[in-house]
Structures are given as structure tokens and as C-alpha cells.
Amino acid sequence: MKFLKYIVTCFVMMASLSGCQKTQKLSITNVSYDPTRELYSAYNKQFIHYYQKTYHQAVTVVQSHGGSGKQALEVDNGLKGDVVSLAVQSDVDTLMKSGLIKQGYIHHYPHQSAPYTSTIVFLVRKGNPKKIHDWQDLTKKNVGVITPNPKTSGGARWNYLAAWYAFEKQGLRVTQIKKQMKALYHNVLVLDSGSRASTTTFCENGEGDVLITWENEAYLTMKENPGDYEMIIPSASILCQPTVALVDEVVKEKGTRKVANVYIKHLYSASAQRLIAQNYYRPVNKTIYQKQRATHQSHTIKKLTKRWIVDDLSMTTIDHFGGWAKATKVHFQDGGYFDEIYK
């Protein structure tokens, strides 16, 4: 009888443990760059609901934000990010080189593992007092420019390359482009560590006449401060392709590969793409993109409209600079063009 009682007790304990395992929540961490805070706050809620409904398992998502380069360094130094969604591919390459992410990650998801894009624009104060309309205006005397530091911020690198391309389109040689870039960066009042910090400097601290920033960041600022700012779309810019990837060594250690993989794949779903567009990132879904494309392509945006994507400008890509490895070596490594320009 005692033996039978022991067997029953063991069965109850095992059933209890099994029940705990079934109800135990999964948890993943998405390490991202600054201006995605609002996007991922909304997306994580959508994903948690989707994963529960589809896989009948609860999951929590922890977010980490900062300058893209700094975030890559944090993961490299031990931050357990299951997923990285960084501003530039070169920051993900850093983690690949250290062995945390497998080679070929850029081909693991559609559109070179970029589920949304953006571009670089200007944010100016109401009425555009300094009459800023294009990159050349940022080189004028008495124009205070706010942009982050390319040494720590992925957004800052996009800003820099967009400016370089714009001056190049004028037919200038490298030495002449450097001169224009030097004049632009001579006007920079503060080099913050990340894009969101630069927004704070411009908006909350009231410094500068123009903020060079992500398109989505400019729209979000206008949404939060109706009538205080205007967005200027320059004649030339760059297509920004933020990169997402699984951190292979972390998901292997934590046993979270499946959920982290679904987390990234779901970014390409129609529901997530609509959410991406609502947060002023350019969706890669062509149908949803066209629904957001502005019918009147004005380059001065004074108020928000439903159809907000303006694309009648000359827009290059990172391929124009030979890819991120070459662009980083030429422009951003110690002793590169940026150091030469900014010294």
C-alpha cells in the first residue's frame, strides 16, 4: 500500500512539473538601435499575440536600444540578444566576425535581411527660418547642424554617406567633396552617440537649426509636436536598409532558435508590414508601400498625411560605396575620411 501511495505521489509531481513546463514563458531579447523604440513596442505586442495564437505558448520580448555600434559592442561583450535589428549591416558583421552570428546571415531572410527601409531627411523648425532645402545649405555660415557620431551611430553613417553622395552628384571630385563635408561638419554643434540622443538635443534642448535624421524619426517628431517642425526632403539621399539577424550562439545556448526565427519572419507578414508603415518605416511589401506613397510629392512636409512616402528624389544605396566593408574602411575606420574631415 505504501508503495502504491509512493507511485501516485510521483505521478502527481511529474504531472505538476509537466504543467509548469507547458505554462513556462519563453523570453527573447531584441537588441536594436535608437529610433526603433516605438516600432518594436507596437510590434512586440502584435508578435506576442500571434505566437500565443499560432504556437499555443506564451512569450515575452525584452527590448534594448542605443546607438547601433554601441549595441553591437554590448552583444559582443555578453549581452544575451537572441535577435539583433541594427541600423547598418557592418554592425552585424562585427558579431559575425566574433563568431556569434553565422556567415551568410544576410541571405537568411528576404530583401537581404532588411524587413523595412528608411532614408535620410532634414528636420527644421517651424517656418524654416534658415531656408534650408538641400545639402549645400548645411555648409553655409551660421547654420547649426545636429547629427550623431558615425563612430557610434549607424544612423550617423547613413547621414554621412547621404551627404557624400549628394555632393558627388554635383560632379565634385573626392578632394572637393571632402571640402564640402568639412564645411558641413564644421557646422555640427553636437555629435551625440545615437540618433535619438540627437533628436533630444535638437527638440528638447533647442540646439541647432537643422537635424539630419531618419525619415521615420522626423515624422514621429512631427506627430508628437504638431506645428513645431517641418521636414525637408533633400534632392539626393540614400536608401537605408537596417539589418535583422539571429544571434546563433545565444539562441543555441538559450534554446530559443524557433521563437527568435519566427519573430524575424513575422516582420515580413502583411500585418507587421502595415504596422511598420504606421510607424513611418518604408515597408518592403510592394502593395503596402504603394498605399503609403504620396500622391503629391512635395519636398517640404508641414503636416502629417495618410500617404507619406515621397520617393521622387535621387536615392543611392550602400552598393554605390562598394558595400559596408569598403565604406567602413574608407570612411569610418580610424584614420579614414571622417577623421580627416572632422579633425
Image (cartoon, rainbow, N blue to C red):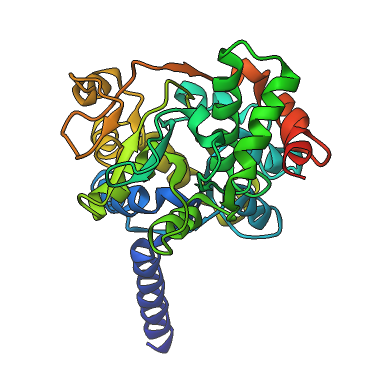
Residue 275, compared with residue 327, is above or below; it is: below
Residue at position x 26%, y 52% in the image: 228
Q: Is residue 51 left or right of residue 152?
A: left
> Looking at the picture, how far across and down is residue 265, in whole percent?
40, 34
Q: Is residue 289 left or right of residue 137?
A: left
Residue at position x 56%, y 35% in the image: 139
> Looking at the picture, how far across and down is residue 293, in whole percent?
24, 22
Q: Quadrant of residue 206?
A: bottom left
Q: Farthest residue toward the bottom?
A: 2
Residue at position x 57%, y 56% in the image: 254
Residue 144, compared with residue 280, is above or below; it is: below
- Choose between 33 and 165: the one closer to the eye: 165
- Choose between 47 and 194: the one closer to the eye: 194
Q: Is residue 226 left or right of residue 31?
A: left
> Looking at the picture, how far across and down is residue 138, in whole percent?
52, 36
- Choose between 101 and 341: the one closer to the eye: 341
Q: Farthest residue toward the right?
A: 335
Q: Farthest residue toward the front?
A: 141
> Looking at the picture, how far across and down is residue 270, in whole percent?
25, 30
Q: Quadrant of residue 98?
A: top right
Quadrant, the C terminus = top right
From this viewpoint, is residue 251 visible?
no
Q: Is residue 309 left or right of residue 265?
A: left
Residue 160, compared with residue 82, is above or below; it is: above
- Choose between 246 and 234: the one closer to the eye: 234
From this viewpoint, is residue 253 visible?
yes
Quadrant, the N terminus = bottom left
Report how many numbered discs are placed on residues in the image.
0
